Image (cartoon, rainbow, N blue to C red):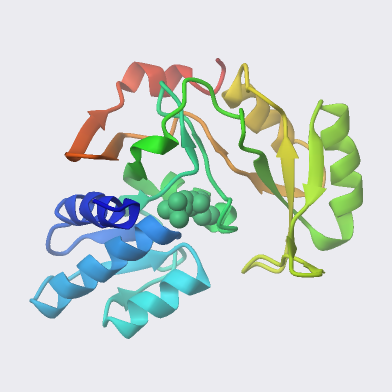
Amino acid sequence: MTTDDSKRAVARRAADLVTDGMVIGLGTGSTAKHLVDRIGERVRDGLRVRAVPTSERTASQAQSLGIALVSLEECPQLDLAIDGADQVDSRGDLIKGLGGALLREKLVARASREFVVIVHSTKLVPTLGSGCPVPVEAQPDEWERVRDRLIELGASPHLRHEGPEPYVTDNGNMILDADFGALENPGQLELRINEIPGVLDNGIFAGMTDRVLIAEDHGVREWVVPTRSRAESPGG
Ligand code: 5RP
């Protein structure tokens, strides 16, 4: 099985969690793309859902497949959000946003009764942060001040580029990829980064995951994250 086949398998399993009448959050990335494809197939077969997309990319894919889109303003409470991740630790905390959609992804995950993460097994790590920076979304006119404050917090931040130009998010902001090394306390760091003026949000998702579906060589493994680790996570 190729990695892409595994991503498709885990995405299809996640799509089975969607039932008629649900309002769902649709993630962004190569794994979430398979999810949107599968939900599109189910909609063609009669499934009725409304979806909040986490990026313009996902919105246009969903629209092209006939999935009805709504905004968080119209539907502030979602039944289920499904998204990929860049790293998942042993408590189900995440780093997300290497695909650039972290702000909307976090708003959607927060608004959902259940947040399901779909990943390839290579994304599982004992500790977040080793080999993966924390993406930080910053207001365009504040990014240099944000960069300086991230350095004070112990990070090596780099402004993300797309070719020669700074990368611009769907919300018109910049992203700083901040390498902190291994994160001792992801929940606390998530809060501290968000206290920096000019920061819109960051890619640490601590204490939010309900379930992780993991693509392994011979199938999909499901991990229900215990409520206690979720509740304890932000403070450490
Ligand atoms: C986008 C994300 C993605 O979920 C994350 O980058 C994983 O993507 P992929 O499924 O392509 O590995 O956070 O902002």
Locate residue 134: give its quadrant: top right
Q: Is residue 77 left or right of residue 199?
A: left
> Vertical placement of 219 versus 161: above or below?
above
Can you give x and y, in whole percent of width and height, for residue 41 in the image? Answer: 17, 74
Can you give x and y, in whole percent of width and height, for residue 64 in the image? Answer: 33, 84
The answer to whether residue 19 of the structure is visible from this angle is yes
Q: Residue at x 41, y 60 (%)?
A: 30
Q: Is residue 235 left or right of residue 6?
A: right
Q: Residue at x 81, y 27 (%)?
A: 153
Q: Residue furthest left?
A: 45
> Vertical placement of 113 versus 99: above or below?
above
Can you give x and y, in whole percent of width and height, for residue 88 in the image? Answer: 44, 32
Question: Quarter of the image containing the C terminus?
Answer: top right
Q: Residue at x 45, y 59 (%)?
A: 29
Q: Is residue 141 left or right of residue 58?
A: right
Asked whether 152 or 196 is in front, the reply is 152
The answer to whether residue 107 of the structure is visible from this angle is no
Q: Residue at x 79, y 31 (%)?
A: 155
Locate residue 221: give its quadrant: top left
Can you give x and y, in whole percent of width and height, for residue 206 in the image? Answer: 51, 30
